[in-house]
Amino acid sequence: MNREDGMSRRSFLVLLGGAAALSACGFQLRGQQDYAFKRLAITGGVPQMVARLERMVQGGSDTVIVKTNENPDATLNLTEGSGMRPLSLNAQGVVQEYELVYSVSYSLLGEDGTLLIPPSSILLNRSMTYSDQYTLAKSQESVLLYNDMRNDAVDQLTRRLAAVRSLHPGPGEQTPDVAPRAPLPVPPL
């Protein structure tokens, strides 16, 4: 056996051991989603969010996004909000840090008006240091942070849509609304 065969075999064993360790801890690649609806209409939301949601749903399932007048199996209603509030002040009373807050309210209705997901919300926050010297840079940073929160909200929303198991849920089968039960913690710096 030459040195190259030994390295190749060792590399293969390391790769095999790594795969076994990842599967043992519950790691799983995202696969194909199986939504209960095959035709989804989206109302509300900003174009950036709707576009990402369309890509995530259509790219990871056999569900297609249609207009509300094209007989969808389900309609997702979205409302988005954002805000900024002071998180800390310096000794002169000038803001040193802001908390950026982003929220998405949503509900899912079936074709016949059945409430598949009751009105629910996704709330996210990020902290951002601030200085008057870097106003333009901090403005751009806040845009990036809001985009990041929007992407995170879309990811959470697709997982919640996948929790719907039937377009005609019986008593006790309705997907529960999801809302935070405690105030959001102050994010780490």
Image (spheres, rainbow, N blue to C red):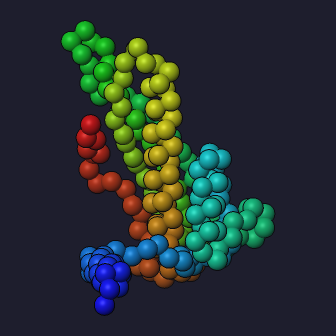
Point 28% across, 41% down: residue = 187
- Name the image quarter holding the C terminus: top left
Taking 129 as reference, is 163 above or below it? below
Point 48% across, 82% down: residue = 170
Is 178 or 157 nearer to us in this picture? Answer: 157
Taking 154 as reference, is 24 above or below it? below
Taking 34 as reference, is 98 above or below it? above
Return the x and y of residue 150 as percentages of the image width and height: 50, 48
For the question of whether residue 28 can be seen, the reply is yes
Point 44% across, 26% down: residue = 138
Taking 23 as reference, is 125 above or below it? above
Return the x and y of residue 160 as percentages of the image width and height: 46, 66
Point 47% across, 53% down: residue = 153
Q: Furthest-top residue in view? A: 92
For the question of whether residue 164 can be seen, the reply is no
**In the visual, does 100 lie left or right of 151?**
left
Return the x and y of residue 26 as percentages of the image width and height: 30, 77
Q: Furthest-bottom residue in view? A: 1
Is 184 or 147 nearer to us in this picture? Answer: 147
Q: Furthest-left residue in view? A: 91
Q: Furthest-right residue in view? A: 69
Looking at the image, how many numbered discs can be counted on the residues?
A: 0
**Quarter assignment of residue 1:** bottom left
Return the x and y of residue 96 as percentages of the image width and height: 30, 21
